[in-house]
Image (tube, rainbow, N blue to C red):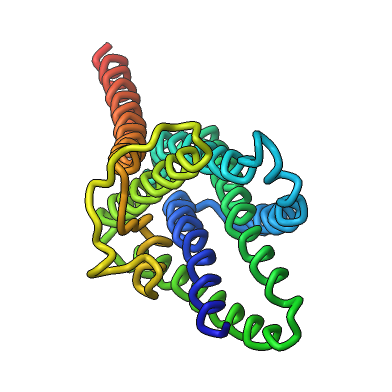
Amino acid sequence: MFLNSVVLILQEILEAALLISVLLVFMRLRCIRPFWIIAAIAAGSAGAYFFALQMASISEWFDYMGQEAVNASIQLTMLLILATFVAQNPGATHSTSKPQKDLRIIICTLLLVALSLTREGSEVFIYISGVIGHPSHAQPTLTGSGIGAGIGISAGVLIYYGLLGLPTKWIALSGLLLLSLVGGNMTSQATQLLTQADWLPYSKILWDSSDGLPENSILGHLLYALFGYEATPSLLQVFSYIAGMLLIYLCAHLGSRKVSFSTDQKTTDHNASVNR
């Protein structure tokens, strides 16, 4: 039970830690104070507790496919919010940022943190409450969960400072790459859940890497948390993963082009006024 608790809690915490760390890096680039994130963490923790308490009744929705449908909805909602976030060109420095875009970035980040903690935190609450009812399992479960949570949070801190330690021009690019992988992971997980609920058709398995790297191994759990690793992905999952990555990339590209166009237009107007 100890090792299972470490791995399972680490997986859940790491998924949220990766996203939150990258978002905080972009906040740092914008010189936005992250004090408000405490409210997002509180809202996410409360949402996770409420979601876990209601999971039994939620599971009965949609012909007993409520859990899959709700989790998929959360993932897709987060994907759209993430696309909106990168469209605000969050990698721009504070000197070139606009107050209205900073506000949108703060709102998107708050929602992403709250929803991420709601989803991942509910899994933690459900797991611990299910195991802790057995007295013999309580101590190893709590100890393993604490260690797993500590490792996950530490990994998030390492990601945060690792990104900030890069040369300035690479910070935003690396952050956007990680966010595109997160977007692909969200879309792939949503596709898998909707397929399990029979809301999407089953498609053929593209490959099977379970012999070399099984999903239930420690490395498999870590890669799933970070990049959505699947040993036997379906065609639809792979397609949705690529589509999610492309959506994030295209929104970021359009956001940066819009900023460049606005800057060029201001320069042209300024030069025209000077020439007069």
Point out residue 22 in the picture as x, y percentages from the top left corner. 43, 56
Q: Residue at x 46, y 49 (%)?
A: 30
Q: Position of residue 101 (x, y in %)?
A: 50, 35
Q: Position of residue 203 (x, y in %)?
A: 32, 37
Image-based side of 236 in relation to 60, left or right: left
**Depth check, front residue: 151 or 58:** 58
Left or right, 59 with reference to 157 = right
Could you say which quadrant of the image residue 37 lies in?
bottom right
In the rendered view, tell whether residue 41 sits above or below residue 242. Answer: below
Residue situated furthest top in the rendering: 276
In the picture, the quarter occupied by the N terminus is: bottom right
Task: Say if 44 sits above or below 146 in the image.
Answer: above
Residue 102 visible, this orientation: no
Residue 188 visible in rendering: yes
Q: Quadrant of the C terminus?
A: top left
Q: Where residue 216 appears, x then y in whole percent? A: 40, 69
- Up the image or down, 86 lies above or below 170; here it is above
Give me the residue at 71% from left, 44% from top.
58
Residue name at image x 28 percent, y 46 percent: 205
Residue at 41% from the left image edge and 39% from the top image edge: 86
